Amino acid sequence: MQIDPAVAIEDPISIDDVRFASEIGTPASSSGKSSGALAPQPLVDFRGTSGRSCSSLDLNTFLRQFDPHELLAELRQSLLSGAQSAVSNYLVALAYSAPTLASVLEMSDRQLTTRFTTFAQICGNQQLRAVGLQDSERRMAQASDQCFAREIVRDTAPTDAYRRCSVDRNFDALALPATMSTIDFLRQHTDLAVTQRIESLLGLLPDERIAAGNYQIRPPKVSLSSLLDSLQIRSRLALDQIIDSVTPSAVAECAPDSIFDPLGPACLPRSASALVASPAFRGVRLLGPAARSTFKDALSSQIAITSVYADLLELAQQIARMNLRSDSDASSSEIQSRQRALEEQVVRLLDQANLQVKLEESKRRLARTQLAALERTEADLRAAADALQAQQTVPLFSVSGLLRLFQDRN
């Protein structure tokens, strides 16, 4: 017979039910309550732009954007300033006395080159202070280097290649490894088999790409807590069906493409298939309504956290073993950078899973605290009842009692 959770919650919770709840690590107050359906997560996409910095200017770009009035003002100030005026006047007279304008052009070229060198040094120092080790600038630098290398192979002039790759950032049509998102890079350049399960787990990680010359980021498609809640809700529904005499083989495995959907049908992770088929699990049908509901709440939570741990560890092993494909033109530094970033992100997810386990341990301590309070209350009530019963059974000898005894005899 199917047990309605709404009915089970109305049943009185005995001290035995509370003791059972504390042993399996769930509060007895949650017995019979199933987590409500979560709202679907909003879709996430890549967003962001990259700002232009002075480090992207070469000499030709600098000359095209340079204000000549600034140089003329500097020359005028040099001609009119005290001790330098004589030397400056001599240099100007010497330059214009030449039969050609070669000396004038040479002087102007030296002035502009000096100005650009000073500007580049100041800009470089500023970039080192401002940029440091930011991921966005490092990814843009990798894309620029890969673009420059491809252009040089195509016999492009170095200046044109530098302008296209570093200034204009026109490398969208080149399909560079550094510009790809994580999924695209893994599929096209590594030997890692990107299955639906792997792709769904990568949705827990943030991602980055370069599009239209801009560095863009994408937050995780779903959080780890949302995944745990979804697995717990759907596992709870599956436990209801199995305990109500449905065979475990009839319950579907949670599909990777719908693993984040809390509104999906009942399912179980693959790590829980052996558990629900064991004889010990079939003995749960003998529990009372409150204890049975408490058991299903605790077990569904443990199934969810165990499944997430298993999937994350499998993902970490896949990332550690991946390598470049034989036909890939990506560099070893590119895959090392990707591999290092993925491993760090998976470690952070495992840390979040550990925090979830600590939360479950806190719930277990709360249940034990509740049990200790109820057991102390039960012991106090039992002691008070025993004392009252002892007082009622002890005979009382008094003068009025003796007089009543003689009156009864008469």
Image: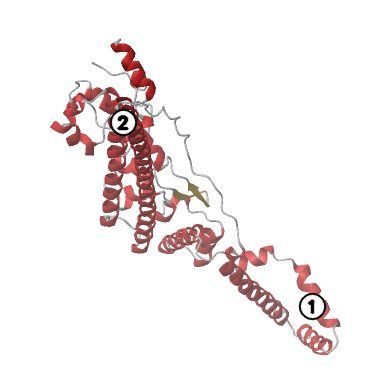
Dot 1: element: helix
User: Which residue is found at the position 26% from the left and 27% from the top?
Assistant: 239
- Kindly check if marks 1 and 2 are in contact, taking CB atoms under 8 A apart as contact: no
- Of mark 1 and mark 2, the one earlier in the sequence is 1
Quadrant in which the C terminus appears: top left
Query: Does residue 235 show up?
Result: no
Q: Does 165 appear above or below 98? A: above
Residue 122: % across, % down: 64, 72
Residue 337: % across, % down: 38, 60
Question: Quick check: 307 left or right of 142?
Answer: left
Q: 242 or 70: which is nearer to us?
A: 242
Q: 108 or 299: which is nearer to us?
A: 299
- Location of mark 1 (residue): 75
> Of the numbered discs in the image, which one, if any, rests on residue 386?
2
Residue 275: % across, % down: 19, 35
Question: Quick check: 57 left or right of 290?
Answer: right
Dot 2: element: helix
> What kind of colouring is applied to the model shown?
secondary structure
Which image quadrant is residue 294 in?
top left
Quadrant in which the N terminus appears: top left
> Of the numbered discs in the image, which one, if any, rests on residue 145?
none
